[in-house]
Amino acid sequence: MNHETSRRWQLLAIAAVIVFLIWLLAPVLMPFALAAMLAYLGDPLADRLQRLGMGRTWAVSIVFTVISVVVVGVLLLLIPLIQRQFQNLAENLPHYVEWVRTTALPWVQAKLRLDPNVFDTDRLLATVREHIGSVGSIAAKAVAKVTQSGMGVVMWLTNAVLIPVVAFYLLRDWDAMMAQIQRMLPRSIEPTVVRLARESDEVLGAFVRGQLLVMLALGIFYGLGLTLVGISIGPLIGMVAGLLSFVPYLGFMIGFVAALIAALVQYGDWTHVILVGVVFTIGQLLEGYVLVPRLVGGKIGLHPVAVIFAVLAGGHLFGFLGVLLALPAASVVVVLMRYAISRYRESDLYTEPAADAPAQSIEVEVEVDVETRRPQPPVSGDGGP
């Protein structure tokens, strides 16, 4: 085994050990992953405050305070709103099911010529009522489940305290940690790793800071728009459509269909149906021509199927931590795949021609410049004509 092969096996072993440790410690790493995400989000703002002449500690303190106020404010605002929306949905559920039974299903059966006994609406109503009724108090049930055991309370309180503390220290020492990691890299691969890390940072910045802002903006727009139209569960539909907008057209389709059904059940006229269509049409135009180009750009390059696969695979392998880190990790994988494809196209495996390939004839185009001269008359010896 030569030196180059040995070095590659060593790097592969180090990467395998890191992945194994992440898989083994996934339940413990969740608060640290959340703290690292908060630190990553706040580092550009802290760097900007530093460039204005502020010390790192003061800059981090200001950024950390702003993030804490925003997170607490959003939680205090959203939890009661979500609970009221689910209660509203549970109360209006019989009207939705009745509309499906008396209007939607007969239309589908008439168009598709189905047996009327195919859809058991009574059982469907009982099942949906059972689940939707419990969702209205999901926060209270989650807290009750956590408090059933003393260890659960201790872990919940530990995470609640650990996440902001770890986020503060990570944010304060972020640049120093990145520099230390760079110094620890083997010198032979350090330039390549640094270049890939910068490209990954661009992709992650486009996703984490850009896509989350797009999701937030669309959720607020759809929620306010449907509320102005008069849909009683408009804020809930808007939040769902905004959260699912990281997959192109998924949030739009689910939100539009849900809002359309809500408008038909609640009002039963074409005016509100048209207004719902206007809200989602404006939302799509806003997303496609304003939000995504300005906030995200074209740096991520993740196919919708790849997004769904990344979320499912991350949840299967690492649980909630995998779901949390699935899309950022997939964005980094995109950068690594681009690098691997470029190296493959430069390798002998790709460029070497086939052994039995016929020789290619080379056509050479020769340009011949022929100069035509007029014949000169003979010259006599005495110089005469």
Image (cartoon, rainbow, N blue to C red):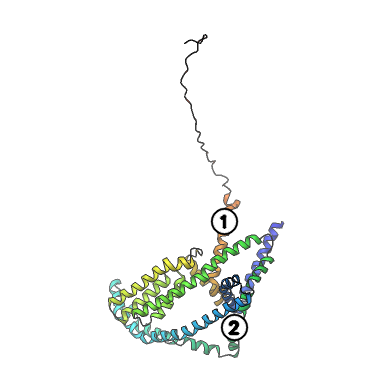
Q: Position of residue 301 (x, y in %)?
A: 50, 63
Q: Residue at x 57, y 74 (%)?
A: 42
- Image quadrant occupied by the N terminus: bottom right
Residue in the image at 40% along x and 80% along y: 235
Q: Looking at the image, is mark 1 or mark 2 earlier in the sequence?
A: 2
- Could you say which disc has been placed on residue 279 in the image? none
- Extreme top residue here? 382
Q: Nearer the viewer, residue 193 or 168?
A: 168
Q: Quadrant of residue 343?
A: bottom right
Q: Residues within 10 Å of mark 1 (few under 14, many from 20)?
A: few
Q: Are marks 1 and 2 in contact (CB under 8 Å)?
A: no
Residue 342 badge: 1
Is residue 83 depicted above or below 362 in this figure?
Answer: below
Does residue 150 show up?
Answer: yes
- Looking at numbered disc 2 in the image, what kind of residue is underneath it? Asn
Q: Amino acid at mark 1?
A: Ser
Circle 2 packing at 10 Å, graded few (<14), some (14-19), many (20+), is: some
Residue in view at x 39 percent, y 78 percent:
224
In the drawing, does residue 339 fall left or right of residue 247? right
Q: Examine the rendered structure and indicate whether residue 151 appears above or below residue 337.
A: below
Q: Please give the count of numbered marks on the rendered protein.
A: 2
Residue closest to the eye, 379 or 33? 379
Name the residue carrying label 2.
Answer: 159
